[in-house]
Amino acid sequence: MGAALLRRLAQGALVVLFVVATCFTLIRLAPGDPFFRALDEGSVPAEVRSAQLARFGYDRPIPEQFVRYVGNVVRGDFGWSHSRGQPVGAAIAAALPATLLLVGTAGLLAFVGGVSVGAWTGWHADRSLSRGLDRLAMLLLSIPDYLLALLAVMGPALAWGLFPVGGARTEFGPTGLLGVVDRLHHLALPVLALALPIAAVVMRLQHAAMREVREAAFIRTARANGVRETRIRWRHALRNALVPVLSYGGVQFAAALSGVVVIERIFAWPGMGRLLYEGVLSRDYPLIAGGVLVGAIGTVLGTMCADLALRWADPRQRGA
Amino acid sequence: MPRCSRFRSAVLLLAALGCGPADRDGGGTVIIASPADTETLLPALRTTVTGRMVTELLFDPLVELGPSLNPFGDAGFEPRLAASWAWDADSLALVMTLDDDAHWHDGQPIVAADVVAGYRVIMDPANGSPIRSEVTDLDSVTARDARTAVLHFKGRTAEPLVTAAAVVPLPAHLVDTIPSGGLATSAFAQQPVGSGRYRLVAREPKARTEFAAVLDHYRGRPGPDRLALVVAPDPATGIAKLWAEEADVWDNLPPTEVAAAGSHPQVRLIRADGWDYTFIAFNYRDPADTSRAHPVLATRAIRQALSHAVDRDQLVRALFDTLARPLLGPFVRAQFTADTTLTPPPFDTTEANRLLDSLGWSTRDRAGIRQRSGRPLRLRALVPAPSANRVRASVLVQEQLRRIGVDLVIEKLEGQAFGAARDAGQFDLVFHGVGTTPSVRGLRTTWASRTPGGQGRLNAGNFRDSLFDASLEAGLSALDPERTRTEIRTAYGRVIDDAAAIWLYEPVQVAGVHRRFLTPAWRSDAWWRTIGEWRLDPAAVRLPRDAAPAAP
Amino acid sequence: MNGAPRSRELGARLGAAFLALVGLAALAAPWLTAHAPTTQLDPVALAWQPPSAAHWLGTDSYSRDVWSRLLFGARATMGIALLAVTVSLTLGTLVGALAALAPRWIDTLLMRATDALLAIPRLLLLLLVVAGAGTLEVAPLALLLGATGWMTTARVVRQESSRLLATPHLEGARALGVPSGRLLTRHLLPSLLPTLAVAATAAFAAAVPLESGLSYLGLGVRTPLPSWGNLLADAESQPLAHWWVIVFPTLAIAGTVLAANALASALERRWRR
């Protein structure tokens, strides 16, 4: 077990290295540089810009830059964010908690909500409420997520004034307990906009799996052997039906980061999605590398957790 | 120049009146929402308009252009850190006497060495200061004594005080220890100690920057106690914040939002002259090989034909309704040198078709696109995706050109890719935008012939005309403002006459401001410069954030 | 049987009918509208016209007929989505099934490579590529979407395949020495069909909105070519004042994805029986 885990961790480290190297290279191949500031401002002469590029070593061959970057990271130096005027470490330290809060809340809501609703509707697939919920999930899935977010800004926030329009907290707002309430108030809409589409997918997967499991041979056997109905449902059926949801969940970490890019832009949320998106637009090489590094580590860890959960849920996978 | 103590006491009096007897309510809190963050906190490193705003709030210049917006000579300027100035006998040295009461935010007095430090930081090539080209008129800056700094000019120039205003003093006791080239990554760049009416309190890059009023400022205590620049990357969200009273200012509302403002009575709209203009520049050089002339567009008649084909009145109405005007040439109407008698080619498709026919582009393919010796009249236009107006303009122009048989291929690129392709000359047409200031020296960057020294960097189409260059330089070195105006207008005429561009539009600025603030006359070129004069309307209902901040 | 009441069958039929209708409308677009999708009638006088007899779905900010743009936009959007799904499904199935059938070390290699690609946020990858390549035409955009979207399918297929291979039927076939290729085409793929149907639905459901999401970020199909994403991107500001430019493309997107979902669930049930 220990050796397997170690091997898995080593593989994960290779994955992270590959991901960072890919983004590191792609962004340097794109036109532009970190010292190009604004669309129509040509006031930085080309020779000044190339001097700056040389100062930070961006004129060196990409492999050489990468090796040096890895060396710096090992020593704990993530470099300087040109577009933010602060160390990359500080930028990520500010953005990561905001995104973890957003994604964590949304992910928890989406999976707990989606699994429980989906399990119920799947088990009671013949009821009209269950069919209605399934259709609602389908409808949610069919609206582009950015549109859902824009509608959330336009409706509840702007037209009805129930929620703040954007940002993570009220400027010069309350502190203490009221401050926490204020933050939750700001969190509500972006979390919903992020969670609803994921919840819909989870619910549909869980619904389908539960229906299938309900008819499965081992459930019928259990039932014939006189195992109690609730035990059948929760111990045997749900556990087996979780397989597709868990394997979906395992791949959702990076996808969630994509969704976060759009949500954070629309809700002016100061998190990792914006950090990466703006990093790409401003060719802030160290910032992108740092953001991708953190994102990749998170994704790899997430996938590993999902795999572990899969082994728990589906004993047949243990040998594989 | 009179010392401005009288002015200062008037401001103090005003402040006392505006804030009520006990000053208990404070001056309120202004939240400025913006789609972009500043790129720096230091004046020497700023490039964008937001950068200008933030650095000008934190740092006072030596002198500042007043409301006349006349950049030539001395008359239009007001004292700031320099309480007065005088020219030395040879008219090449400007002697600046610093204000006795001026202090850095850390309490140190501002001395002549700080002026020298500000200049040195700009001139150090390792710092890569983008405003270095604005001070090339200067030969050196020296400290005559602790309170007197001298700016030595290389020669006579029409806008000496524009140059002087660019030399923003920096605290020598803090910046002199920064190694060469280390300015941008220094601790000072993240936590600057400034001289402006507001000091930095907290900053989260790309999210928010918070400022507090400097209570003992030499120009008097500013009105609002606190400012915050809040970044909303999606303009729709930022403007929605203004409508929802979560923000107090959005300085450039698009026409659709202006139309919607009626349903938000707490926001007052303020119209002001615009300083940005947009045009389509023609590439004079071959995109495949910039050492050769452009195979199609190097001919003036074809540039004229394309100009005649664009209905600019319709374009402006469709994009801006009444909130923009068709552009006249390489200038905006608010500029001192603007010449409204100049007229670009009028909309005339008959003339456009005649010109194209006469140039041999007479046969048409099945889609109606003109051809000459088997080659279709197809042109690639660069459009920056971040500019919604230019993207929309390109769609309208594409259709208008199609009607005279020209196939315009739109290359919509994100900002960096757009800039790179534009600077490399890889296009036939480019939807170009220029942000001007009252000063006309920007023409050196936007329209002067390209030189290795860096002139004409934004002259994307590589327009090259020695008479233009001569008129421009004559204008910029003349000492008589009227002479400057005449020369610059001659230069404008050269660009228009050569049909170097299709002159599209100059938008009017419409700012939205929360009604509880009484604002002085709006400075169209830099509205934030008068934010210290904002007052809470005694009759208006205050918001929770206006409560006086707790004493530090 | 028990889980297939008539209303579900009806839903599936409606879904199929809707998709067929959209497909037909896309093909027959030139005969269904009097206006060309890119023609600007009069950008000043005829912009933002509400739905009327002359313009069934109104006009947009450039005075182009929205009905016509919706019809022609279906071509680009459906084309992109179908091509992208084809690419991602083929790649994903190949990688996933291969990993399940192949020796352990190939399996590990393929799955870790998939993990690695999955660890790059798709939007970031698209952004990086588009930033480098500039404006994209329809086919490269579709290929790009497909090439960046196969990893989820691969993981699910790998998971499902190893589950199936453990069933008595396939275990038996394997024990009897059925060659891998035959095992894949004759035994594994048919059993995978329900999973693939769901995966295809998910990929299709992702590709249609992704196309419009890219347009929202300004990275979509080249103007003035209409696509449903472009329609929405053009409509961005003031959705309440000019509802028709946002409602109809949204309905088209939502309807198409809904129809595809309904159809896929029905197919899945049919195969399972």
Image: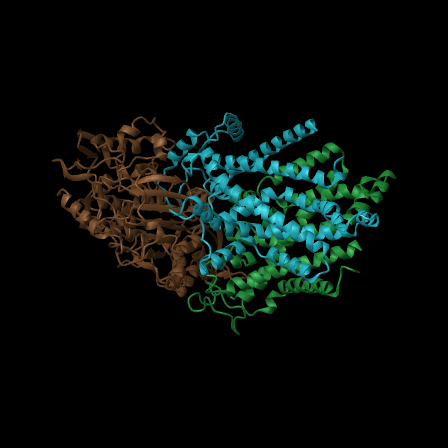
Chain colours: A cyan, B brown, C green
Q: Is residue A150 above or below residue B472?
A: below
**The N terminus of chain A sits in image quarter:** top right
- Foreground residue, B36 or B218? B218
Q: Residue at x 59, y 33 (%)?
A: A16
Q: Is residue A222 left or right of residue B460?
A: right
From the viewer's perspective, is B7 left or right of B319?
Answer: left
The answer to whether residue B287 of the structure is visible from this angle is: no
Image-based side of B207 in relation to C155, left or right: left
Question: Residue A18: horizontal and vertical position, in percent?
Answer: 59, 33
Q: Is residue B186 visible?
A: yes
In the displayed structure, does residue B204 sit left or right of residue B8? right
Pick whichever, A282 or B259, lies toward us: B259
Q: Residue furthest bottom?
A: C53
Residue B543, percent across and down? 34, 53
Q: Position of residue A60 (x, y in %)?
A: 48, 29
Q: Nearer the viewer, residue A88 or A213?
A: A213
Please provide percent x and percent y for residue B395: 46, 58
**Quadrant housing residue C172:** top right
Residue C15, placed above or below residue C102: below
Labels in figure, total: 0
Quadrant in which the C terminus of chain A appears: top right
